[in-house]
């Protein structure tokens, strides 16, 4: 098992190297002179030359790559072309809000959605099931900005329970964090509850038709025991996959939510960087999200065997 | 044939079912499924419930457990367990009774056990639900019951997951789980149907042993008359949700009163081999030294099939017989080139196809067609029967119109109406679907037809008809048939030659009359001896004369 874990971890290295290569080439292979692109339309003739010098663009390509990779491994992600501050610091500032809201969203979603899905499967085609499915369709189809603004209107403006916008980090106290993070998290939760509840329901329905569920009932087990001890663990693997990929998507940044609630997260950093053609920042964001995707996938894969002993490595 | 002749008149009544009616309610209205079933089982008695699929055997048993699927409900009648009416119980009271006083084992132990829990924990769960034993007491009870079902190395087995055990071991686990609380009634729903004959024999004797030890009443559901002959005290025959006939086992098998019972018994294939047919010199398939191995070279290779050879002539049937894991399906897959053989020759109509490239093999594929065990899964559920039948010929260059004409002719040959071509697989019964699968294979005008357990999923009366269809098609088209089966009775009915496989090797090969009538190899003899009810001639309602008994006269 530990041998497998090591092998799986090592197998992520080629993927990450490919991503790094792609990110590196992104700038170098874009049409035109990167230095000119970076310098922009209003540049003086001397500026591209300076940039070329500064970024080492006058070196051979492979040498540029190794220099760039070396910097990367030392945590040097370059300097923003706009703010002229180190990119690593910018990312560090922005990852906190994104990560904490992502975690809060997943925590609420999983706690709500899994029991909802189980209940819907258990009461298949009954009222509860129809309610859960209706909610799922709504949660999935109402755009996030609509949900977000409705929440702001009701909970912030009318009831005054939460601030309208802004973000307080968790280091400033749990309560102040929750006051600013809860509405954005709940906004995102509507989607993820819909997704995870549907997935749970579908897989539980499959599992509840299995012979061993009949056996569990023939043993005199209560319905709670049948559902949670016998069914849920068997239904877990696909649900886990959805939770994992859902979490990865959240970390990639959720621009709309961050914009609605004015949260300084990765999503807005990305959009700002793209609009400003701030290449070092774009590169850093791509690298970060790819790395987190690979990491989360690895964790999901490895956790399968916890739920299903037939999956052995 | 030694029947059970125990008397239970003095024994306490364990369960009594009176006028049980079960109905299904759906959009089409309420339809009865069971029409007033009466059944009584005394302590220590084994009652066999026999009937074909859809007769209501399993519904009866699930009604006793009150585990009917949501679409079915008990409409009337009584189910009394030692005088207590189960229908009057609240759900919680009924739960307390399950496993404690009525327990059940199922057909397929692989799917009946939870795949993600250790088997020891699954047995201990019964104790956790119904007793106040501590964890260490539960553990001791689990190990003790595992020993009673004669499992080896109980410590290790209790920590295993179902997939790490063999089919027989898994069914022993199910039995241990069912009997750990010494219930009054054990319901066994086809508990040996998915097992090999030799394993079946062991499981049947285990149930018998534990029944005698605990005085359990056993309701044994089966479609297999051989099993009935071996284990039943009393037999109940069901059909279309009604009890057709019941009585002690000997009178019922030797002098059935009802036509349906006679019909059912007459359909049981005999173990006596078919009369020899004239041999043909026209060889269509010759297999020599065929092996399929996995893993490294040298000593560490694992052989799924090792050095197997036989010849198949036009109009003849060769049976490949063996238990699960014997390599018979691997052999068939190698011959069909669905997997590549590791060594040997497969001479199909004069061409060695063993080493042909996939592209070079494609023209030969038409000559080799196959019918699988489960026609529900081998027919595409989204395609009409017509689409399914014409696909092969169209792939080989027929026009769709010609192929459809041929399909219409073929579907009638296999005994289905022409309009079947426009319908979908789910609209047919299991036997009809198998006819369709046969039509699909024969549409290709093959020289060799491979039937891989092609009648194993069918009821005996349907089985007899499908076997007849194979015979008729063979006579008409001169097919060479390679018939793979685990069922010696079926092999005796249809095969001219039989090849017995064990662990990848052919242990015996020869004329059916010789292999089944006077087997030389100990394994063949063991297989035949394990065949339930082999001493009884079901079709003629009498013991099989000793000279005709399979396995020869050297026993008894």
Image (cartoon, coloured by chain):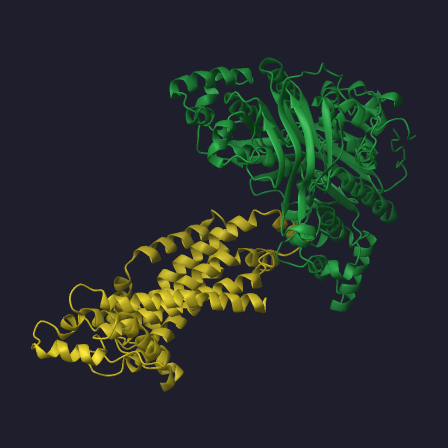
Vertical placement of residue B431 versus B88, above or below:
above
Can residue B216 be seen here? The reply is no
Chain appearing in yellow on the rendered image = A
Res A287 quadrant in image: bottom left
Res B274 quadrant in image: top right
Q: Farthest bottom residue?
A: A172
Who is closer to the viewer here, B385 or B473? Answer: B473
Residue A219, horizontal then vertical, whole percent: 69, 53
Who is closer to the viewer here, A176 or A73? Answer: A73
Can residue A282 be seen here? The reply is yes
Vertical placement of residue A244 versus B192, above or below:
below
Res A33 quadrant in image: bottom left
Chain B tint as drawn: green
The total number of labels drawn is 0
What's the residue at 27%, 75% (across, down)?
Answer: A263
Residue A291, horizontal then vertical, whole percent: 38, 69
Q: Split into 4 quadrants, where in the image is the N terminus of chain A?
A: bottom right
Q: Is residue A292 left or right of B465 when viewed as pictured?
A: left
What's the residue at 47%, 58% (across, down)?
Answer: A239
Residue A47, horizontal then vertical, whole percent: 11, 78
Who is closer to the viewer here, B473 or B455? Answer: B473
Residue A294, horizontal then vertical, whole percent: 41, 66
Q: Split into 4 quadrants, where in the image is the C terminus of chain A?
A: bottom right
């Amino acid at each position: 098992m530990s041998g497998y874990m090591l092998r799986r971890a090592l197998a992520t290295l080629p993927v990450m190297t490919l991503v790094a290569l792609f990110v590196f080439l992104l700038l170098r292979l874009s049409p035109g002179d990167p230095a000119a692109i970076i310098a922009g339309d209003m540049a003086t003739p001397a500026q591209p030359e300076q940039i070329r010098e500064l970024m080492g663009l006058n070196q051979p390509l492979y040498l540029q790559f190794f220099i760039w990779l070396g910097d990367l491994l030392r945590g040097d992600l370059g300097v923003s072309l706009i703010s002229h501050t180190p990119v690593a610091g910018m990312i560090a500032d922005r990852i906190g809000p994104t990560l904490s809201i992502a975690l809060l969203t997943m925590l609420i979603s999983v706690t709500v959605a899994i029991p909802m899905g189980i209940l819907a499967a258990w009461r298949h085609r009954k009222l509860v099931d129809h309610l859960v499915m209706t909610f799922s369709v709504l949660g999935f189809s109402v755009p996030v900005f609509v949900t977000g603004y409705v929440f702001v209107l009701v909970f912030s403006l009318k009831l005054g329970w939460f601030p309208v916008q802004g973000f307080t980090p968790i280091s400033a106290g749990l309560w102040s964090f929750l006051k600013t993070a809860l509405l954005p998290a709940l906004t995102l939760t509507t989607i993820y509850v819909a997704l995870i509840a549907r997935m749970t329901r579908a897989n539980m329905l499959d599992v509840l038709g299995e012979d061993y569920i009949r056996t569990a009932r023939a043993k005199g087990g209560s319905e709670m025991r049948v559902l949670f001890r016998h069914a849920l663990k068997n239904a877990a693997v696909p649900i886990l996959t959805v939770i994992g990929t859902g979490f990865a998507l959240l970390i990639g940044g959720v621009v709309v939510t961050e914009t609605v609630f004015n949260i300084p997260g990765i999503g807005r950093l990305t959009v700002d960087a793209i609009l400003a053609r701030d290449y070092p920042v774009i590169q850093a964001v791509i690298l970060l999200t790819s790395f987190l995707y690979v990491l989360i996938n690895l964790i999901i894969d490895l956790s399968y065997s916890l739920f299903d002993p037939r999956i052995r490595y | 044939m030694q029947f059970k002749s125990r008397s239970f008149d003095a024994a306490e009544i364990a369960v009594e079912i009176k006028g049980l009616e079960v109905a299904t309610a759906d959009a089409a209205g309420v339809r009865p499924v069971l029409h007033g079933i009466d059944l009584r089982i005394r302590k220590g008695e084994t009652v066999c419930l026999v009937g074909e699929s859809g007769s209501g055997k399993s519904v009866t048993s699930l009604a006793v457990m009150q585990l009917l699927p949501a679409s079915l409900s008990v409409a009337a009648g009584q189910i009394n367990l030692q005088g207590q009416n189960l229908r009057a119980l609240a759900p919680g009271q009924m739960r307390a009774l399950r496993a404690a006083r009525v327990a059940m084992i199922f057909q397929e132990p692989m799917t009946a056990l939870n795949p993600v829990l250790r088997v020891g924990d699954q047995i201990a769960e019964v104790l956790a639900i119904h007793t106040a034993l501590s964890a260490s007491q539960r553990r001791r009870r689990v190990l003790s019951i595992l020993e009673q079902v004669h499992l080896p190395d109980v410590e290790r087995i209790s920590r295993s997951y179902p997939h790490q055990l063999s089919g027989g071991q898994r069914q022993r686990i199910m039995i241990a789980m069912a009997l750990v609380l010494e219930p009054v009634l054990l319901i066994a729903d086809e508990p040996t149907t998915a097992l090999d004959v030799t394993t079946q024999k062991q499981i049947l004797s285990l149930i018998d042993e534990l029944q005698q030890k605990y005085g359990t009443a056993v309701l044994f559901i089966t479609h297999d008359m051989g099993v009935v002959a071996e284990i039943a005290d009393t037999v109940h025959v069901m059909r279309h949700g009604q009890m057709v006939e019941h009585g002690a086992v000997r009178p019922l098998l030797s002098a059935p009163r009802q036509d349906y019972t006679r019909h059912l018994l007459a359909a049981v294939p005999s173990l006596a081999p078919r009369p020899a047919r004239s041999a043909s010199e026209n060889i269509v398939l010759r297999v020599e030294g065929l092996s399929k191995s996995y893993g490294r070279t040298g000593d560490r290779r694992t052989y799924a099939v090792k050095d197997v050879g036989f010849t198949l002539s036009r109009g003849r049937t060769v049976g490949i017989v063996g238990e699960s894991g014997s390599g018979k399906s691997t052999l068939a897959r190698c011959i069909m080139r669905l997997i590549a053989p590791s060594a040997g020759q497969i001479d199909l109509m004069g061409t060695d196809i063993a080493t042909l490239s996939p592209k070079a093999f494609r023209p030969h594929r038409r000559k080799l067609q196959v019918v699988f065990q489960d026609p529900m899964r081998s027919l595409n559920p989204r395609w009409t029967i017509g689409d399914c039948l014409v696909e092969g010929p169209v792939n080989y260059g027929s026009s769709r119109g010609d192929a459809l004409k041929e399909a219409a002719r073929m579907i009638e040959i296999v005994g289905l109406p022409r309009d079947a071509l426009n319908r979908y697989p789910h609209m047919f019964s299991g036997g009809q679907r198998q006819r369709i699968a046969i039509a699909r294979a024969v549409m290709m005008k093959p020289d060799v037809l491979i039937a891989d357990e092609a009648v194993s999923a069918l009821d005996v009366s349907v089985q007899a008809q499908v076997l007849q269809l194979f015979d008729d098609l063979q006579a008409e088209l001169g097919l060479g048939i390679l018939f793979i089966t685990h069922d010696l009775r079926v092999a005796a009915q249809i095969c001219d030659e039989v090849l017995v496989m064990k662990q990848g090797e052919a242990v015996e090969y020869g004329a059916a009359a010789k292999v089944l009538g006077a087997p030389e190899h100990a394994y063949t003899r063991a297989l035949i001896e394990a065949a339930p009810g082999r001493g009884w001639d079901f079709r003629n309602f009498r013991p099989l004369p000793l000279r005709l008994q399979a396995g020869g006269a050297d026993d008894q």
